[in-house]
Amino acid sequence: DEARMEWWQDARFGMFIHWGIYTVPAGFYNGEAQTNSAEWIMNKGKIPVAEYEKFADEFNPTKFNADEFVALAKQAGMKYMIITAKHHDGFSMFDSKATDYNIVDATPFKRDILKELSIACQEQGLKFGFYYSQAQDWHHPGGLGNSWDKSFERVSSDAYVYEKALPEVKQLLTEYGPISNFWWDTPREMTKSVVDSLHHITTALQPWIITNDRLGDDYPGDHKTFERNGPRHQPEAKYWELCQPVSGSWGYRSDDDNFKSIPTLIHNLIDQSSKGGNYLLNVSPTREGILRTEAVERMKAIGAWMDTNSEA
Ligand code: JFZ
């Protein structure tokens, strides 16, 4: 285990990416700002499944360039990248074989951005991993979290896992090269057997993988994840990570001007790493596939600080 965790413990800094079709409404539904992190808009706006699906028709991030994205992370001094393969909205950001509700089959873009990023990361020497919302899925009739849409008949959570989550996780672990991390999120009432299955295929298919602590009760994972710094969150755990969005929202929203200052970001990085933790900093690509200039500026400034202050 020590050997498996070694690169991660040395890494100190990683890029988190929240990206999905919620960048089309970008925080606004029926002209009204939804007061929440943008990737929650379907839930907060109680948007019916059939209506939310239409955002996929308009998702066409033609300005996306995986090489440039990975190069920027490297320039910032980041050592690994974790991207949302599927968030709570249930939309798969890769060429899923389990559902057509994915970036290749359901959008005019038709490109598998996870494949493109996995290749770019391998070429440029960055570790690459996935965020996956295993319990909440507001699109599948058995996924947890969608109680506002009564237009379809519900199936069991187990049925959802066997039809969608397990096959997708398996595909992500077998068709995208070496996967450094699996970042589960929001464990909810799932049966022990499906949680066990998710855990077992993950470690069996990628024995070197590192997982966080959000799969389910019986699984502490390899490291803890925290969202806010401060004394309460300085853990006693050996392996831990602080994750934060560079601005106010995880997913892109058009009115988000709440960017953390460059000194704050550098402070957070030093603060976490000096205490033995990692800092997973989230950026939010737009519906066009690019980052806001404020975010790019910040990545470059952190990189410049690293260059002047590193010993190598
Ligand atoms: C979850 C997601 O719901 C959210 O959209 C985002 O992906 C974030 C990284 O993770 O939100 C959480 C999960 C756990 C806590 C807070 C927000 N927590 O434990 O404090």
Image (cartoon, rainbow, N blue to C red):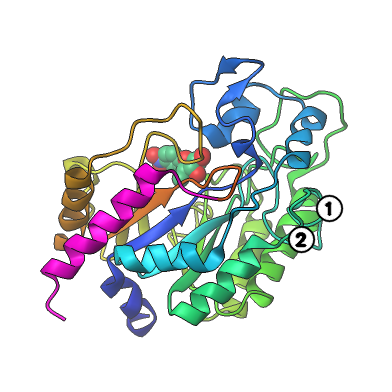
Q: Are marks 1 and 2 in contact (CB under 8 Å)?
A: yes
As rendered, which of 299 and 51 lies closer to the eye? Answer: 299
Q: Residue at x 59, y 38 (%)?
A: 23
Disc 2 secondary structure class? loop
Which secondary structure is most common in the magenta stretch? helix
Residue at far bottom of view: 3
Query: Where, by quadrant of the figure, is residue 58 drawn?
Result: top right
Q: Position of residue 251 (x, y in %)?
A: 51, 40
Q: Is residue 148 left or right of residue 33?
A: right
Disc 1 crowd rating (10 Å Cα; few below 14, some 14-19, many 20+) is: few
Please name the residue that numbered disc 2 is placed on: 96
Residue 78 lies in magenta, yes or no? no
Q: Amino acid at mark 2?
A: Ser
Q: Residue at x 79, y 43 (%)?
A: 156
Q: Position of residue 175 (x, y in %)?
A: 69, 75
Q: Position of residue 252 (x, y in %)?
A: 51, 38
Image: magenta residue range:
290-312
Q: Position of residue 52 (x, y in %)?
A: 74, 32
